[in-house]
Image (cartoon, rainbow, N blue to C red):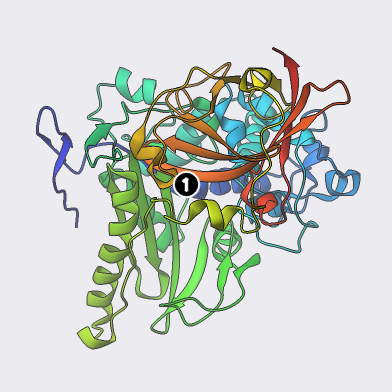
Amino acid sequence: MVKSYGVSDITTSKSVTEHTLFMIGSTSKAFTAAAISLLVDDNIKFPNIHWNTPVHGIIPTDFVLNDSWATSQMTIIDILSHRSGFPRHDRVWLANITLQEAVQSIRHLPLTASPRTEFQYSNLMYSVAAHIIETVTNQSFQSFLRDNIWLPQDMTETYLYLSDAKDAHQDISQGYFEDLNGKVISSDQVSIDILRGAGNILSSVSDYAKWISTLLNCGPPLSPGTYGMLFGAQFVAERNPTEPFQTPTLYGLGWQIQVYKGETIISHGGSQIGYGASVVLLPERNFGLVILGNNMNGTSAAADILAYHIIDEELKIPLEQRADAAMNTTHLSKHLLSEIYPKLPSPPLSNPLDLSAFEGYYTHPAYPDLRISTDCISNSKAYEVLNRTTPDLCILHTRPNDYSKDMEWGLFHVYGTYWLQIVLWSGGLSAARIEFSIGSDGLVSRLGIEIEPAMAQKGEKIWWTHISP
Protein backbone atom coordinates (compact mmCIF):
# COMPACT_ATOMS: atom_id res chain seq x y z
CA MET A 1 0.00 0.00 0.00
CA VAL A 2 1.32 3.44 -0.97
CA LYS A 3 0.00 6.75 0.35
CA SER A 4 1.07 10.28 -0.57
CA TYR A 5 0.31 13.51 1.24
CA GLY A 6 1.01 17.21 0.81
CA VAL A 7 2.77 19.09 -1.95
CA SER A 8 6.14 18.63 -3.61
CA ASP A 9 6.48 22.31 -4.48
CA ILE A 10 4.80 24.99 -2.38
CA THR A 11 5.10 27.61 -5.13
CA THR A 12 3.04 25.54 -7.59
CA SER A 13 1.03 23.49 -5.04
CA LYS A 14 1.95 20.38 -7.01
CA SER A 15 0.78 17.30 -5.14
CA VAL A 16 3.07 14.52 -4.02
CA THR A 17 2.39 11.15 -5.67
CA GLU A 18 3.83 7.67 -5.19
CA HIS A 19 6.17 8.47 -8.10
CA THR A 20 7.55 11.74 -6.69
CA LEU A 21 11.30 11.54 -6.05
CA PHE A 22 12.90 12.51 -2.74
CA MET A 23 16.51 12.47 -1.63
CA ILE A 24 16.81 9.55 0.77
CA GLY A 25 19.93 10.58 2.71
CA SER A 26 21.67 7.88 4.73
CA THR A 27 19.16 5.19 3.83
CA SER A 28 21.39 5.12 0.72
CA LYS A 29 23.95 3.23 2.82
CA ALA A 30 21.91 0.04 2.48
CA PHE A 31 22.44 0.16 -1.30
CA THR A 32 26.18 0.70 -0.84
CA ALA A 33 26.54 -2.30 1.46
CA ALA A 34 24.43 -4.38 -0.93
CA ALA A 35 26.64 -3.30 -3.84
CA ILE A 36 29.77 -4.34 -1.96
CA SER A 37 28.16 -7.74 -1.29
CA LEU A 38 27.95 -8.33 -5.05
CA LEU A 39 31.72 -7.94 -5.29
CA VAL A 40 32.22 -10.31 -2.34
CA ASP A 41 29.97 -12.93 -3.95
CA ASP A 42 31.65 -12.71 -7.36
CA ASN A 43 34.67 -14.98 -6.95
CA ILE A 44 35.38 -14.99 -10.68
CA LYS A 45 35.78 -11.25 -11.30
CA PHE A 46 36.81 -10.27 -7.78
CA PRO A 47 38.47 -13.31 -6.15
CA ASN A 48 40.48 -11.15 -3.75
CA ILE A 49 37.56 -9.20 -2.30
CA HIS A 50 35.99 -10.65 0.85
CA TRP A 51 34.26 -9.10 3.84
CA ASN A 52 37.48 -9.26 5.86
CA THR A 53 39.75 -8.03 3.07
CA PRO A 54 41.83 -4.99 4.18
CA VAL A 55 40.71 -1.91 2.25
CA HIS A 56 44.31 -0.74 1.75
CA GLY A 57 44.97 -3.93 -0.24
CA ILE A 58 42.19 -2.98 -2.68
CA ILE A 59 42.92 0.75 -3.12
CA PRO A 60 46.46 1.10 -1.68
CA THR A 61 47.25 4.51 -3.13
CA ASP A 62 44.06 6.20 -2.00
CA PHE A 63 43.22 4.57 1.34
CA VAL A 64 45.77 5.56 3.94
CA LEU A 65 44.95 6.38 7.57
CA ASN A 66 47.14 8.37 9.94
CA ASP A 67 47.87 5.16 11.85
CA SER A 68 49.94 2.51 10.04
CA TRP A 69 48.43 -0.47 11.87
CA ALA A 70 44.88 0.75 11.18
CA THR A 71 45.80 1.29 7.53
CA SER A 72 47.00 -2.27 7.12
CA GLN A 73 44.19 -3.91 9.10
CA MET A 74 41.02 -1.94 8.28
CA THR A 75 38.58 -4.30 6.55
CA ILE A 76 35.45 -3.88 4.48
CA ILE A 77 33.30 -4.93 7.45
CA ASP A 78 35.04 -2.34 9.62
CA ILE A 79 34.21 0.58 7.32
CA LEU A 80 30.60 -0.55 6.73
CA SER A 81 29.78 -1.19 10.43
CA HIS A 82 31.19 2.12 11.74
CA ARG A 83 33.81 0.41 13.90
CA SER A 84 36.83 1.89 12.12
CA GLY A 85 37.80 4.30 14.91
CA PHE A 86 37.37 7.09 12.37
CA PRO A 87 34.72 9.68 13.36
CA ARG A 88 32.48 11.76 11.14
CA HIS A 89 34.79 14.55 9.94
CA ASP A 90 31.72 15.53 7.89
CA ARG A 91 32.88 19.05 7.11
CA VAL A 92 35.39 17.60 4.66
CA TRP A 93 32.35 17.46 2.36
CA LEU A 94 32.13 21.25 2.27
CA ALA A 95 35.14 21.61 -0.02
CA ASN A 96 34.72 21.59 -3.78
CA ILE A 97 36.61 18.32 -4.32
CA THR A 98 36.14 14.93 -5.99
CA LEU A 99 35.25 11.68 -4.24
CA GLN A 100 38.78 10.37 -4.78
CA GLU A 101 40.22 13.53 -3.22
CA ALA A 102 37.87 13.12 -0.24
CA VAL A 103 39.06 9.52 0.26
CA GLN A 104 42.70 10.58 -0.06
CA SER A 105 42.17 13.33 2.52
CA ILE A 106 41.47 10.73 5.23
CA ARG A 107 45.23 10.31 5.83
CA HIS A 108 45.31 13.84 7.24
CA LEU A 109 42.48 13.27 9.74
CA PRO A 110 42.87 11.79 13.22
CA LEU A 111 41.17 8.65 14.42
CA THR A 112 39.42 9.15 17.76
CA ALA A 113 39.37 5.52 18.89
CA SER A 114 41.28 2.33 18.31
CA PRO A 115 39.76 0.31 15.47
CA ARG A 116 36.99 -2.11 16.51
CA THR A 117 36.62 -0.59 20.00
CA GLU A 118 33.92 2.06 19.57
CA PHE A 119 30.93 2.72 17.34
CA GLN A 120 31.57 5.97 15.47
CA TYR A 121 29.21 6.78 12.62
CA SER A 122 31.26 7.75 9.57
CA ASN A 123 29.84 8.93 6.26
CA LEU A 124 33.32 9.15 4.77
CA MET A 125 33.89 5.42 5.22
CA TYR A 126 30.81 4.70 3.11
CA SER A 127 32.23 6.95 0.43
CA VAL A 128 35.37 4.84 0.61
CA ALA A 129 33.12 1.85 -0.21
CA ALA A 130 31.72 3.67 -3.25
CA HIS A 131 35.25 4.49 -4.36
CA ILE A 132 36.20 0.80 -4.04
CA ILE A 133 33.34 -0.15 -6.36
CA GLU A 134 34.24 2.48 -8.95
CA THR A 135 37.92 1.52 -8.86
CA VAL A 136 37.66 -2.26 -9.16
CA THR A 137 34.73 -2.38 -11.59
CA ASN A 138 35.83 0.54 -13.75
CA GLN A 139 32.20 1.65 -13.63
CA SER A 140 30.58 4.68 -12.09
CA PHE A 141 28.81 3.98 -8.81
CA GLN A 142 25.59 5.11 -10.50
CA SER A 143 25.86 2.60 -13.36
CA PHE A 144 26.85 -0.24 -11.01
CA LEU A 145 23.82 0.32 -8.80
CA ARG A 146 21.53 0.75 -11.80
CA ASP A 147 22.70 -2.36 -13.65
CA ASN A 148 23.07 -4.72 -10.69
CA ILE A 149 20.51 -3.66 -8.09
CA TRP A 150 17.90 -1.22 -9.38
CA LEU A 151 17.00 -2.55 -12.85
CA PRO A 152 16.82 -6.22 -11.70
CA GLN A 153 14.06 -5.03 -9.34
CA ASP A 154 12.44 -2.79 -11.97
CA MET A 155 13.37 0.27 -9.91
CA THR A 156 13.14 2.82 -12.71
CA GLU A 157 12.55 5.84 -10.45
CA THR A 158 15.82 5.69 -8.50
CA TYR A 159 18.90 7.77 -9.30
CA LEU A 160 22.24 8.69 -7.81
CA TYR A 161 22.55 12.03 -9.55
CA LEU A 162 20.01 14.83 -9.47
CA SER A 163 20.99 15.81 -13.02
CA ASP A 164 20.11 12.33 -14.34
CA ALA A 165 16.69 12.45 -12.68
CA LYS A 166 16.08 15.87 -14.24
CA ASP A 167 17.21 14.66 -17.67
CA ALA A 168 14.69 11.82 -17.35
CA HIS A 169 11.95 14.40 -16.61
CA GLN A 170 11.10 12.80 -13.29
CA ASP A 171 8.84 14.50 -10.77
CA ILE A 172 11.36 15.65 -8.14
CA SER A 173 10.16 17.20 -4.92
CA GLN A 174 11.64 20.45 -3.73
CA GLY A 175 13.33 20.20 -0.33
CA TYR A 176 12.55 22.67 2.44
CA PHE A 177 13.74 23.92 5.81
CA GLU A 178 12.61 26.67 8.17
CA ASP A 179 14.79 29.71 8.73
CA LEU A 180 15.20 31.31 12.17
CA ASN A 181 12.06 33.36 11.64
CA GLY A 182 9.97 30.28 10.90
CA LYS A 183 9.74 31.00 7.18
CA VAL A 184 9.81 27.93 4.92
CA ILE A 185 12.80 28.11 2.57
CA SER A 186 13.54 25.94 -0.47
CA SER A 187 16.85 24.11 -0.48
CA ASP A 188 16.82 24.28 -4.30
CA GLN A 189 17.32 20.50 -4.42
CA VAL A 190 20.94 20.96 -3.37
CA SER A 191 23.07 17.89 -4.04
CA ILE A 192 26.80 17.19 -4.28
CA ASP A 193 28.36 14.24 -6.09
CA ILE A 194 30.98 13.40 -3.45
CA LEU A 195 28.21 12.26 -1.08
CA ARG A 196 27.77 9.08 -3.12
CA GLY A 197 28.07 5.95 -1.03
CA ALA A 198 26.93 7.76 2.10
CA GLY A 199 23.86 9.49 0.66
CA ASN A 200 22.70 11.38 -2.42
CA ILE A 201 20.29 8.78 -3.88
CA LEU A 202 16.86 9.93 -5.06
CA SER A 203 13.92 7.55 -5.11
CA SER A 204 10.14 7.31 -4.92
CA VAL A 205 8.04 5.36 -2.44
CA SER A 206 6.84 3.26 -5.37
CA ASP A 207 10.39 2.14 -6.10
CA TYR A 208 11.27 1.82 -2.43
CA ALA A 209 8.33 -0.56 -1.94
CA LYS A 210 10.02 -2.89 -4.45
CA TRP A 211 13.31 -2.64 -2.54
CA ILE A 212 11.60 -3.39 0.79
CA SER A 213 9.83 -6.40 -0.71
CA THR A 214 13.15 -7.77 -1.97
CA LEU A 215 14.77 -7.30 1.44
CA LEU A 216 11.93 -8.90 3.39
CA ASN A 217 11.90 -11.92 1.08
CA CYS A 218 15.72 -12.15 1.03
CA GLY A 219 15.47 -12.26 -2.74
CA PRO A 220 17.81 -11.60 -5.66
CA PRO A 221 19.91 -9.87 -6.82
CA LEU A 222 21.51 -10.39 -3.39
CA SER A 223 22.54 -13.87 -2.30
CA PRO A 224 20.89 -15.60 0.69
CA GLY A 225 24.14 -15.42 2.66
CA THR A 226 24.39 -11.68 2.10
CA TYR A 227 21.28 -10.98 4.16
CA GLY A 228 22.87 -12.56 7.21
CA MET A 229 25.76 -10.11 6.84
CA LEU A 230 23.64 -7.02 6.17
CA PHE A 231 21.10 -7.67 8.93
CA GLY A 232 23.42 -9.49 11.34
CA ALA A 233 25.00 -7.71 14.30
CA GLN A 234 28.49 -6.61 13.31
CA PHE A 235 28.97 -4.18 16.21
CA VAL A 236 27.24 -2.68 19.25
CA ALA A 237 26.10 0.86 18.51
CA GLU A 238 24.47 1.60 21.90
CA ARG A 239 25.43 -0.63 24.82
CA ASN A 240 22.39 0.22 26.93
CA PRO A 241 18.79 0.00 25.76
CA THR A 242 17.21 3.33 24.87
CA GLU A 243 13.49 4.00 24.95
CA PRO A 244 11.38 2.53 23.50
CA PHE A 245 13.63 -0.47 22.76
CA GLN A 246 14.32 -3.45 25.01
CA THR A 247 17.85 -4.33 23.92
CA PRO A 248 21.12 -2.59 23.04
CA THR A 249 21.22 -1.11 19.54
CA LEU A 250 23.28 -3.20 17.14
CA TYR A 251 24.61 -2.25 13.72
CA GLY A 252 24.87 -4.52 10.70
CA LEU A 253 26.03 -3.25 7.32
CA GLY A 254 23.95 -0.19 6.48
CA TRP A 255 21.26 -1.18 8.99
CA GLN A 256 20.66 -0.91 12.72
CA ILE A 257 19.02 -3.72 14.67
CA GLN A 258 16.79 -3.25 17.73
CA VAL A 259 14.00 -5.05 19.58
CA TYR A 260 10.66 -3.30 20.10
CA LYS A 261 7.78 -4.99 21.94
CA GLY A 262 9.51 -8.33 21.39
CA GLU A 263 9.86 -7.77 17.64
CA THR A 264 13.17 -7.46 15.78
CA ILE A 265 13.31 -4.05 14.10
CA ILE A 266 15.78 -3.45 11.25
CA SER A 267 15.89 0.18 10.26
CA HIS A 268 17.81 3.24 9.15
CA GLY A 269 17.05 6.93 8.97
CA GLY A 270 18.27 9.50 6.49
CA SER A 271 18.69 13.26 6.32
CA GLN A 272 19.85 15.49 3.51
CA ILE A 273 19.39 19.24 3.26
CA GLY A 274 15.66 19.72 2.71
CA TYR A 275 14.75 16.02 2.95
CA GLY A 276 14.24 13.24 5.49
CA ALA A 277 13.69 9.49 5.22
CA SER A 278 13.04 6.45 7.38
CA VAL A 279 13.01 2.76 6.44
CA VAL A 280 11.81 0.12 8.92
CA LEU A 281 11.58 -3.65 8.48
CA LEU A 282 9.95 -6.27 10.74
CA PRO A 283 11.38 -9.39 9.09
CA GLU A 284 9.54 -11.89 11.30
CA ARG A 285 6.22 -10.45 10.11
CA ASN A 286 7.31 -9.79 6.52
CA PHE A 287 6.28 -6.19 7.16
CA GLY A 288 8.10 -3.02 6.17
CA LEU A 289 7.56 0.67 5.60
CA VAL A 290 9.32 3.69 4.15
CA ILE A 291 8.60 7.34 4.85
CA LEU A 292 10.03 10.02 2.56
CA GLY A 293 9.50 13.74 3.08
CA ASN A 294 10.63 17.14 1.88
CA ASN A 295 11.62 18.78 5.15
CA MET A 296 14.80 17.52 6.82
CA ASN A 297 14.11 18.25 10.50
CA GLY A 298 10.35 17.95 10.17
CA THR A 299 10.44 14.60 8.41
CA SER A 300 13.11 13.18 10.70
CA ALA A 301 10.99 13.99 13.74
CA ALA A 302 7.65 13.02 12.20
CA ALA A 303 8.98 9.81 10.65
CA ASP A 304 9.61 8.22 14.05
CA ILE A 305 6.16 9.18 15.25
CA LEU A 306 4.46 7.92 12.09
CA ALA A 307 6.58 4.78 11.74
CA TYR A 308 5.93 3.57 15.27
CA HIS A 309 2.25 4.46 15.06
CA ILE A 310 2.03 2.18 12.01
CA ILE A 311 4.11 -0.50 13.75
CA ASP A 312 1.93 -0.30 16.86
CA GLU A 313 -1.12 -0.73 14.66
CA GLU A 314 0.46 -3.79 13.01
CA LEU A 315 1.40 -5.26 16.40
CA LYS A 316 -2.00 -4.28 17.89
CA ILE A 317 -0.33 -2.54 20.84
CA PRO A 318 -2.84 -0.98 23.28
CA LEU A 319 -2.79 2.83 23.29
CA GLU A 320 -1.55 3.05 26.87
CA GLN A 321 1.50 0.89 26.01
CA ARG A 322 2.64 2.81 22.94
CA ALA A 323 5.91 4.73 22.73
CA ASP A 324 6.22 8.49 22.84
CA ALA A 325 8.52 10.11 20.26
CA ALA A 326 10.54 13.23 20.93
CA MET A 327 10.90 16.16 18.55
CA ASN A 328 14.39 17.45 17.82
CA THR A 329 15.38 21.08 18.12
CA THR A 330 18.20 23.10 16.66
CA HIS A 331 17.91 26.14 18.93
CA LEU A 332 20.94 27.24 20.93
CA SER A 333 20.78 27.40 24.71
CA LYS A 334 20.26 30.78 26.36
CA HIS A 335 23.23 29.85 28.52
CA LEU A 336 25.42 28.98 25.53
CA LEU A 337 28.51 30.98 26.52
CA SER A 338 28.71 29.64 30.09
CA GLU A 339 28.05 26.09 28.89
CA ILE A 340 30.85 26.19 26.32
CA TYR A 341 33.23 28.18 28.54
CA PRO A 342 32.23 27.21 32.12
CA LYS A 343 35.39 28.69 33.70
CA LEU A 344 35.57 32.17 32.26
CA PRO A 345 38.14 34.43 33.96
CA SER A 346 36.75 37.51 35.65
CA PRO A 347 37.44 39.99 34.30
CA PRO A 348 38.10 38.29 30.93
CA LEU A 349 41.48 38.80 29.29
CA SER A 350 41.38 41.29 26.47
CA ASN A 351 42.01 40.44 22.84
CA PRO A 352 45.81 40.61 22.34
CA LEU A 353 45.55 41.78 18.71
CA ASP A 354 43.47 44.05 16.54
CA LEU A 355 40.70 42.24 14.65
CA SER A 356 42.48 42.91 11.36
CA ALA A 357 45.40 40.73 12.50
CA PHE A 358 43.17 37.64 12.31
CA GLU A 359 42.08 38.27 8.73
CA GLY A 360 43.44 36.22 5.86
CA TYR A 361 43.56 32.68 4.50
CA TYR A 362 43.86 29.49 6.54
CA THR A 363 44.64 26.07 5.09
CA HIS A 364 44.27 22.43 6.13
CA PRO A 365 45.29 19.36 4.08
CA ALA A 366 41.81 17.77 4.38
CA TYR A 367 39.27 20.29 5.60
CA PRO A 368 38.21 23.17 3.32
CA ASP A 369 40.48 26.21 3.16
CA LEU A 370 38.97 29.20 4.94
CA ARG A 371 39.16 32.96 4.81
CA ILE A 372 38.57 35.13 7.88
CA SER A 373 37.15 38.60 7.39
CA THR A 374 35.88 41.54 9.44
CA ASP A 375 33.26 42.23 6.76
CA CYS A 376 30.42 40.17 8.24
CA ILE A 377 26.68 39.73 7.76
CA SER A 378 24.37 41.01 10.47
CA ASN A 379 21.93 38.33 11.63
CA SER A 380 20.27 39.17 14.91
CA LYS A 381 18.34 35.88 15.14
CA ALA A 382 21.46 33.74 14.84
CA TYR A 383 23.37 35.64 17.48
CA GLU A 384 20.61 36.72 19.85
CA VAL A 385 21.75 34.25 22.56
CA LEU A 386 24.83 36.50 22.87
CA ASN A 387 22.78 39.70 22.63
CA ARG A 388 24.68 40.51 19.47
CA THR A 389 23.64 41.29 15.92
CA THR A 390 27.01 41.12 14.13
CA PRO A 391 30.02 38.89 14.87
CA ASP A 392 33.53 40.21 15.47
CA LEU A 393 34.88 38.08 12.63
CA CYS A 394 33.38 35.67 10.10
CA ILE A 395 34.65 32.67 8.13
CA LEU A 396 34.16 32.16 4.42
CA HIS A 397 34.92 29.09 2.30
CA THR A 398 37.47 29.82 -0.42
CA ARG A 399 36.17 27.04 -2.73
CA PRO A 400 32.55 26.51 -1.69
CA ASN A 401 30.33 23.81 -3.14
CA ASP A 402 26.54 23.82 -3.24
CA TYR A 403 26.38 22.62 0.39
CA SER A 404 28.67 25.26 1.88
CA LYS A 405 27.94 28.32 -0.25
CA ASP A 406 25.20 29.68 2.07
CA MET A 407 26.81 28.87 5.43
CA GLU A 408 27.36 31.72 7.89
CA TRP A 409 30.22 31.33 10.37
CA GLY A 410 30.27 34.06 13.02
CA LEU A 411 33.19 34.37 15.47
CA PHE A 412 32.93 36.15 18.83
CA HIS A 413 35.85 36.97 21.07
CA VAL A 414 35.54 35.47 24.57
CA TYR A 415 38.87 36.02 26.31
CA GLY A 416 42.54 36.09 25.37
CA THR A 417 43.01 33.95 22.28
CA TYR A 418 39.76 32.02 22.83
CA TRP A 419 36.65 32.59 20.76
CA LEU A 420 33.16 31.22 20.18
CA GLN A 421 31.89 30.13 16.78
CA ILE A 422 28.20 30.12 15.79
CA VAL A 423 27.30 28.53 12.45
CA LEU A 424 24.01 29.06 10.64
CA TRP A 425 23.33 26.39 8.04
CA SER A 426 20.02 25.50 6.39
CA GLY A 427 18.01 26.95 9.24
CA GLY A 428 20.02 25.16 11.95
CA LEU A 429 22.47 26.60 14.47
CA SER A 430 25.56 25.06 16.05
CA ALA A 431 28.31 26.42 18.27
CA ALA A 432 31.90 25.46 19.07
CA ARG A 433 35.04 26.68 20.81
CA ILE A 434 37.76 28.32 18.74
CA GLU A 435 41.37 29.16 19.55
CA PHE A 436 43.99 31.19 17.72
CA SER A 437 47.72 30.59 18.14
CA ILE A 438 50.08 33.55 18.07
CA GLY A 439 53.68 32.97 17.03
CA SER A 440 56.87 34.41 18.53
CA ASP A 441 56.66 37.15 15.89
CA GLY A 442 53.40 38.36 17.35
CA LEU A 443 51.38 37.26 14.32
CA VAL A 444 48.49 34.79 14.14
CA SER A 445 49.90 31.43 13.08
CA ARG A 446 47.03 28.94 13.44
CA LEU A 447 43.26 28.59 13.86
CA GLY A 448 41.83 25.72 15.91
CA ILE A 449 38.14 24.75 15.81
CA GLU A 450 36.37 22.02 17.77
CA ILE A 451 34.66 21.10 14.54
CA GLU A 452 34.60 17.29 14.88
CA PRO A 453 32.18 16.27 17.69
CA ALA A 454 34.12 13.18 18.78
CA MET A 455 37.28 15.28 19.13
CA ALA A 456 35.41 18.15 20.80
CA GLN A 457 34.33 15.80 23.59
CA LYS A 458 38.02 15.50 24.45
CA GLY A 459 38.71 19.21 24.00
CA GLU A 460 40.65 18.57 20.77
CA LYS A 461 40.57 20.82 17.72
CA ILE A 462 41.24 20.69 14.01
CA TRP A 463 44.01 23.19 13.22
CA TRP A 464 44.32 25.37 10.13
CA THR A 465 47.56 27.19 9.26
CA HIS A 466 47.42 30.95 8.62
CA ILE A 467 49.11 31.32 5.23
CA SER A 468 48.50 34.93 4.21
CA PRO A 469 46.78 38.15 5.32
Secondary structure, mark 1, is helix
Depth order, front residue of 182/334: 334
State the image quarter where residue 228 is shown.
Answer: bottom right
Q: Is residue 326 above or below residue 41?
A: below
Name the spot of residue 140 as percent of width and height, x first: 56, 25
State the image quarter where residue 184 is shown.
Answer: top left
Image side of residue 348 versus residue 328, left or right: right
Name the spot of residue 344 as percent of width and height, x first: 64, 53
Which residue is painted at 52% across and 63% down in the image?
256
Q: Amino acid at mark 1?
A: Ser
Disc 1: CA contacts within 10 A as few (<14), some (14-19) or many (>=20):
many
Instruction: Pick the quarter of the image with the C terminus.
Output: top right
Instruction: Pick the quarter of the image with the N terminus.
Output: bottom left
Image side of residue 373 versus residue 138, left or right: left
Depth order, front residue of 435/62: 435
Name the spot of residue 267 as percent of width and height, x first: 44, 62
Identity of the residue furthest to the front in this view? 347
Image side of residue 359 versus residue 436, left or right: left
Q: Which residue is mark 1?
A: 26
Q: Is residue 143 above or below residue 75?
A: above
Which residue is painted at 79% across and 21% down in the image?
443
State the image quarter where residue 333 is shown.
Answer: bottom left
